[in-house]
Image (cartoon, rainbow, N blue to C red):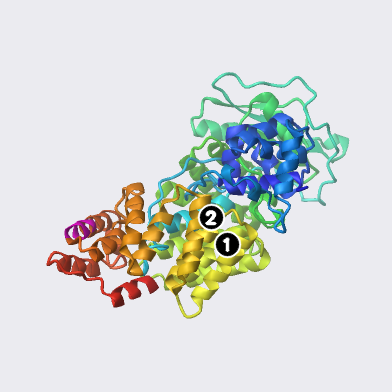
């Protein structure tokens, strides 16, 4: 029987939702969902959590009971579970094949989401509007709403996951005593405390945003006990006043916290938005920030993630306390979906010129992450993000999620640029390093395949197909692998292959409009307009922007419906001029104008040679 984590991964992949969305809608913390999926926690504690997740994932009764059974709980109908596993006992071992009728609509994740959904990477931010990235050759994969939603936003799905348990280290000062202390050896291991608070909890008042700061565990001589929590509270409170956040208050929790599970329990008991906790010795402090809306999971191994490493701050105490307070304030803003304010807090912390390389790298990471969400998806904002990611990598070259973000940002900038070659090369280089280190991660494979397809040099189609083959192998229920592989097969002339892949895409994601447009394009450029037209109409109906009208115009022209074809192309060019005026040549503006001239003379410009050239990109 599959493990709970294996089943949960299958059901989540099929549903096409993110850990962040699942956490928000069920009340189960995202870090808990991650631990289940990765097998770190073998089974859930509460049956009710499994039932809420099953409802959100729209599982059939048999699938729900299978998940309950794998989680160590009694199913409602054991007979149905047995039948389900019997039906799924083929060589693939994929339980989902047993109940195809329970497949639900997949969603497209957009740039600006954190942690998979809002991403962001990881808090949960509202989806930002996704500007369609431009096309270079074919009118399919390069389409803005298709490419940037998959390439740049997938970055958010992954890169933002790794935020909650950030540890900052700065020198503690005894009272009275000197302003700075020499850094001693690392603190001794934390003592084990009960996973739930034992003292009477402090509870947030209605409308109050509460930050709880727990007493820090000390590992010093009895005559050198520092009021670390009080110092942190003072710095955080000062920054809250600067930000004029009158509804946000700080309190000292009655007992120490030494592990994430305790921090989670304190947040639940108090209704707080953040918990600050940690330990210290004679010369430095380890402080953790935990928030229910932020993500402490990691797309890569935790040792490679910015939020998994300590922020070593050991120069000037007042400045260092302010740096930590600003980071805490940024965490609060992100948990409250106040992304512009979060970015400002991280930028202010970076402006304090922290001397520790890990501190600087982490702040560069978050500024690069949030800047495009605040300032929009444009080449200049992507350039700013790339500069911050590059600064972070110069300090921490092994942080693969930063490299992944930079690679996908290079790809996003390429799609929004007339001269895209250098950015595509850079994207492929970054993503290849990530794939080499993490060969089973799907998102870098998807994005590198897109970059190969877009570059379209000799051998790039084969490289792209290999990447999408691997995606399908790793995640057979992920429609993106089939969809993008179909585009490669369209360009290479593999009719049977693209038809099968697009059919599978529509089965897994019935409402995914780009699949209909891909059918329209493929049949239209193959000279089969009768087959293409229903798909063309469906794509245009689902996409009111005008970006799909050029595909339908190709089909209408072949049906001798010249007036309608010309009208579609006029509307298409109106969309290009309104949304991407600087990219008019990249969207074939002059060439489309020549098509319109012939159509208005009742001539079909789409000769077999032109159709073949369009298909090959």
Would you call the spot at circle 1 few (<14 residues within 10 Å), some (14-19), or many (20 or more)? many
As for residue 333 lying within the magenta part, the answer is no
Q: Where are the magenta residues, as a range?
A: 563-568
Give percent across and percent down for residue 406: 53, 61
Indicate the secondary structure of the residue bearing disc 1: helix
User: Can you identify the residue that label 1 sits on?
Assistant: 444
Give percent across and percent down for residue 506: 48, 53
In the image: residue 563, left or right of residue 49: left
- What predominant SS class does the magenta segment belong to? helix
Residue 326 seen in the current view:
no
Residue 547 lies, with reference to residue 220, above or below; the image says: below
In the image: residue 319, left or right of residue 424: right
Which residue is nearer to you in this view: 470 or 272?
470
Q: Residue 459 got which mark? A: none
Outermost residue, left direction? 601
Query: Tag count in the figure?
Result: 2
Give percent across and percent down for residue 305: 66, 54
Residue 102 lies, with reference to residue 533, above or below; the image says: above
Outermost residue, right direction? 221
**Alpha carbon separation for disc pair 2 and 1:** 15 Å
As for residue 565 lying within the magenta part, the answer is yes
User: Can you identify the residue that label 2 sits on?
Assistant: 479
């Amino acid at each position: 029987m599959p493990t709970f984590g294996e089943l949960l991964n299958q059901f989540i992949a099929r549903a096409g939702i993110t850990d962040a969305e699942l956490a928000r809608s069920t009340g189960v913390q995202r870090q808990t969902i991650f631990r289940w999926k990765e097998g770190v926690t073998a089974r859930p504690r509460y049956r009710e959590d499994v039932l809420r997740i099953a409802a959100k994932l729209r599982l059939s009764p048999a699938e729900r009971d299978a998940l309950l059974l794998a989680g160590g709980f009694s199913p409602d109908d054991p007979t149905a579970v047995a039948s389900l596993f019997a039906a799924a006992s083929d060589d693939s071992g994929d339980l989902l094949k047993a109940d195809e009728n329970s497949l639900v609509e997949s969603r497209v994740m957009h740039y600006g989401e954190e942690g998979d959904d809002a991403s962001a990477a990881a808090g949960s931010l509202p989806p930002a509007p996704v500007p369609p990235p431009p096309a270079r050759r074919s009118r399919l994969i390069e389409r803005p709403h298709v490419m940037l939603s998959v390439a740049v936003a997938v970055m958010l799905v992954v890169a933002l996951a790794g935020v909650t348990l950030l540890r900052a280290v700065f020198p503690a000062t005894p009272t009275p005593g000197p302003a700075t202390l020499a850094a001693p050896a690392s603190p001794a291991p934390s003592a084990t405390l009960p996973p739930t608070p034992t003292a009477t909890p402090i509870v947030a008042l209605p409308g109050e945003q509460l930050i709880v700061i727990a007493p820090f565990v000390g590992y010093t001589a009895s005559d050198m006990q520092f009021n670390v929590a009080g110092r942190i509270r003072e710095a955080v409170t000062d920054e809250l006043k600067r930000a004029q956040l009158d509804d946000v208050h700080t309190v000292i929790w009655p007992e120490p916290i030494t592990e994430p599970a305790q921090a989670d329990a304190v947040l639940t008991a108090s209704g707080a938005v953040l918990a600050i906790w940690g330990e210290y010795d004679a010369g430095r402090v380890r402080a953790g920030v935990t928030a229910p809306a932020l993500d402490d999971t990691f797309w890569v191994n935790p040792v490679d993630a910015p939020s998994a490493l300590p922020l070593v701050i050991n120069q000037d105490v007042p400045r260092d306390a302010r740096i930590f307070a600003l980071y805490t304030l940024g965490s609060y803003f992100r948990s409250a979906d106040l992304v512009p304010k979060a970015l400002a807090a991280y930028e202010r912390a970076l402006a304090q010129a922290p001397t520790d390389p890990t501190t600087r790298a982490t702040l560069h990471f978050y500024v690069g992450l949030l800047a495009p969400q605040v300032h929009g998806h444009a080449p200049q904002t992507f350039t700013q993000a790339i500069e911050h990611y590059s600064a972070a990598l110069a300090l921490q070259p092994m942080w693969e999620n930063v490299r992944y973000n930079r690679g996908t940002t290079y790809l996003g900038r390429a799609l929004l640029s007339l001269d895209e070659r250098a950015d595509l090369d850079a994207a492929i280089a970054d993503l290849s390093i990530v794939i080499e280190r993490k060969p089973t991660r799907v998102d870098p494979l998807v994005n590198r395949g897109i970059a190969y397809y877009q570059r379209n040099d000799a051998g790039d189609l084969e490289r792209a197909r290999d990447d999408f083959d691997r995606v399908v192998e790793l995640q057979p229920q992920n429609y993106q692998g089939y969809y993008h592989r179909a585009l490669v097969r369209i360009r290479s002339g593999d009719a049977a292959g693209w038809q099968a892949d697009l059919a599978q895409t529509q089965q897994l994601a019935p409402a995914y409009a780009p699949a209909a447009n891909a059918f329209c394009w493929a049949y239209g450029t193959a000279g089969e307009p009768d087959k293409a037209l229903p798909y063309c109409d469906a794509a245009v109906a689902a996409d009111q922007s005008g970006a799909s009208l050029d595909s339908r115009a190709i089909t209408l022209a072949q049906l001798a419906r010249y007036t309608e074809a010309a009208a579609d192309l006029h509307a298409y060019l109106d969309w290009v001029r309104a949304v991407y005026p600087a990219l008019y040549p990249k969207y074939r503006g002059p060439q489309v104008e020549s098509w319109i001239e012939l159509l208005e003379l009742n001539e079909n410009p789409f000769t077999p040679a032109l159709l073949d050239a369009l298909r090959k990109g």
